[in-house]
Amino acid sequence: MYDVCIIGAGVVGCAIARELSRYELRTLLIDRAGDVSQGASKANSGIVHGGYAAPSGTLKAELCAEGNRRFSQLEAELHFGFRRCGSLVLGFAEEERAAVERLYENGIANGSEGLSILEGSEIHRLEPNVSLEARFALRCASVGVASPYELTIALAENAVANGVELRLFSEVLAIEERGGFSIETARGPVEAAFVVNAAGVAADRIAAMVGACNFSISPRKGEYLLFQKGYGSILSHVVFQVPTDRGKGVLVTSTYHGNLLIGPNVEEAASPEDVDTSPEALLSIIETARRSVPGFELSKLLTSFSGVRAVPDRKDFIIEESEIPGFINVAGIESPGLTSAPAIAERVVRILRDAGLSLRARGGFASRRKPIIVPKSLSDEEVSQRVKLDSSPERIVCRCERVSEGEILDCMGRGIPVESVDAVKRRTRAGMGSCQGTFCRPRVTALLARELGIAAEAVRERSDELTKPVRVKRTFYREVAQGAQSGG
Ligand SMILES: Cc1cc2nc3c(=O)[nH]c(=O)nc-3n(C[C@H](O)[C@H](O)[C@H](O)COP(=O)(O)OP(=O)(O)OC[C@H]3O[C@@H](n4cnc5c(N)ncnc54)[C@H](O)[C@@H]3O)c2cc1C
């Protein structure tokens, strides 16, 4: 019997797991996918918002401003990749001035830090590549960029290091309330006294399983274009346009790792799994982004991707104990959910306490987690030498991002199963460089096969698959190959 079962290992579920790991509890974190961060938390803008956009008095406003304030400390503890760079909301026509001033006032009311309004020349002094058509802007110095999946992985690793159990490939299929909760998962039954439903775009379906659903969630897609690493340096701020009813609009920014990122648009998704991108949508994003930053070069384009927002029929985050005592819904966590996650987690712990969960601080909570990616200053010559090394922690496996074998082994030994090429990529950046994995994919696959004791053919490419593949021992393949050669 677990004290708490958290359903969903996105940034919200992982932040809650880490917060609960401060107490003497048996906490279980489960996800249907083969790794953490497989929902919205892996594909978003990665902006740590300032908190000026959400209407005052909403949970979004309160938790965004509070979450933003937690990020410097979180980065110091968990090393996932975060820096404060500030943002600009550009106004192009006098008619937009009132909207920009309203954002400023709203931000002050919400407790956002570092707000000011800039006029044309000040904008262009700060950002020479921003359109000369921009006449004024709201600046928010406290906005930052974070690596969203690295944050989620770091929270999960730290929670696991502090005693939380993580079960992957454990899709929740049914939940029954009988003075506690019996949860049927794809990997067997689970019993828990309290359940936290943090299942993102599936949160309404999970809540409905136990009769605790008084909301609905719609999937809404956002597409992006990602440019080469280093090209993000054409800007230092995150550059937005004036928001509309449908959200914050298309932004142009550097990612934490220095890629230029433009997007997202807003479109109804065909299903929660619909992460296709379309040429029409991408062209429209390019056109809109050029209004803010006219000169970016498409020759630097690397790839496109999309993420799916969990849009609730209520206009705010839903974070409450449901009508079923002990069943907590943490649903409709659309943007700024990444920013708000640390504050959401603290709120959920208070809700659990008020619902009767006994909280006794655990001695020896370790708040720190070592980074995986270690900055290296290797010349091209040294990289070429190290690529040729036989198995060694120094061997370079990914040329573009200079990822070593040692870093890959390190990411595999941190308490979370790392069993796919994608899982290695999100932890080390192997495959994220300009060749997009052409060089390193076979090497990463071979390393995974060696470490997992399986055939290269059995190594999974992606982590979001729902079933664990049947593992076939390398010896079996060898026998089959030998049998085939000898006509057997
Ligand atoms: C396009 C886009 C841009 C965004 N930009 C920003 C931004 O710049 N800044 C910001 O603060 N926020 C942003 N957000 C919002 C942010 O990404 C989300 O609020 C956050 O990632 C939500 O996290 P989550 O843990 O609630 O959901 P998710 O990350 O979706 O996690 C839910 C998890 O539940 C699991 N699950 C689902 N069903 C089941 C089941 N039956 N059994 C077990 N597990 C299940 C899924 O596999 C998934 O891992 C953006 C979102 C999108 C889509």
Image (tube, rainbow, N blue to C red):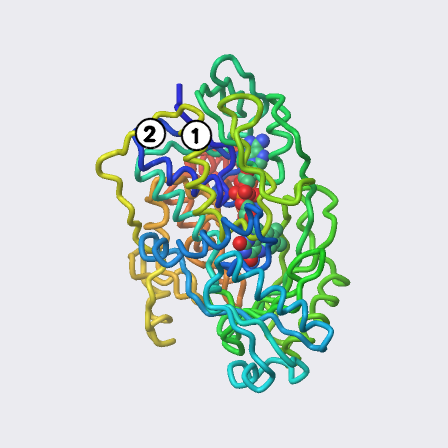
As drawn, 431 above or below 40: below
- Name the residue nearer the viewer: 202 or 115: 115
The residue pinned by badge 1 equals 352
Q: Looking at numbered disc 1 in the image, what kind of residue is underneath it? A: Leu
Helix, strand or loop at mark 1: helix
Name the image quarter holding the N terminus: top left
Residue in the image at 37% along x and 35% along y: 20
Residue 237 can be seen in this image: yes
Residue in the image at 69% along x and 59% along y: 265
- Name the residue nearer the viewer: 441 or 257: 257
The x and y percentages for residue 81 are 41, 60
As drawn, 58 above or below 331: below
Residue in the image at 53% along x and 76% along y: 235
What is the distance, in whole Å, between disc 1 and disc 2 at their CAs? 9 Å
The residue pinned by badge 2 equals 359
Helix, strand or loop at mark 2: loop
Mark 1 touches mark 2? (CB < 8 Å)? yes
